C-alpha cells in the first residue's frame, strides 16, 4: 500500500452557521466602524468637487434641461402629449452608474 491509500481523514471541516446569515447583530455591534468607513468614502468621493454632494442632484437636472431644449425645442421630436422632461428621463436613467471605489 502507498501512503495515499493509508491516509485516513479524522477531521471534517464544516461551517458553524448558515453562509446566508446576514449578521445584523454584528453590523449593529460595529456600527461605529461602519459609520466611519461610509463617511470616509463619502468625503473622499466628493472632496475634489466645488459643490460637493449637491452636484449629485444638480447634474441630472441640468442634463434633463439640456435634453429637453435640444430634442423637444430645436429638433422638434414629438412626444405624443407627454411633457418633454418626462420623455427624456428614461434616457438619463438607463445610463446611471453608481460611484465605485
Image (spheres, rainbow, N blue to C red):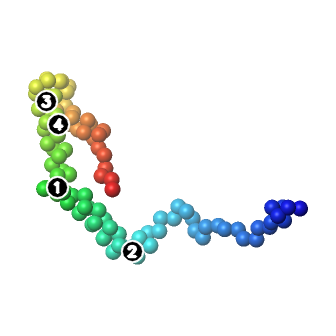
Helix, strand or loop at mark 2 = loop
Q: Is residue 80 visible?
A: yes
Q: Mark 2 points at which residue?
A: 30
Asked if the residue at tag 1 contacts the one at tag 3, i.e. Cβ–Cβ closer than 8 Å, the answer is no
Disc number placed over residue 70 in the picture, else none: 3
**Crowding at mark 2 (Cα within 10 Å: few <14, some 14-19, many 20+):** few
**Quadrant in the rendering for residue 19:** bottom right
* Residue 81 showing in the rendered view: no
Front position among marks 4 and 2: 2
Residue 60: give x, y in percent of width and height.
19, 44
What element does badge 3 sit on? helix
Which of the two discs, 4 and 1, sits closer to the camera?
A: 1
Mark toward the start of the polypeptide (1 vs 2): 2
In this rendering, position of residue 27 left or right of residue 15:
left
Residue indicated by mark 4: 85
What whole-number distance in Å separates the C-alpha atoms at marks 3 and 1? 27 Å
Residue at the location (25% across, 58% down)? 45
User: Where is residue 61, by image quadrant?
Assistant: top left
Earlier along the polypeptide chain: callout 4 or callout 1?
Answer: 1
Amino acid at each position: 500500500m502507498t501512503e495515499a491509500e493509508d491516509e485516513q481523514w479524522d477531521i471534517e471541516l464544516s461551517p458553524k452557521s448558515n453562509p446566508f446569515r446576514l449578521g445584523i447583530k454584528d453590523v449593529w455591534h460595529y456600527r461605529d466602524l461602519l459609520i466611519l468607513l461610509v463617511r470616509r468614502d463619502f468625503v473622499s468621493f466628493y472632496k475634489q468637487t466645488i459643490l460637493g454632494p449637491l452636484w449629485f442632484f444638480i447634474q441630472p437636472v441640468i442634463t434633463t434641461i439640456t435634453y429637453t431644449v435640444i430634442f423637444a425645442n430645436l429638433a422638434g421630436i414629438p412626444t405624443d402629449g407627454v411633457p418633454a422632461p418626462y420623455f427624456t428621463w428614461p434616457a438619463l436613467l438607463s445610463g446611471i452608474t453608481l460611484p465605485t471605489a
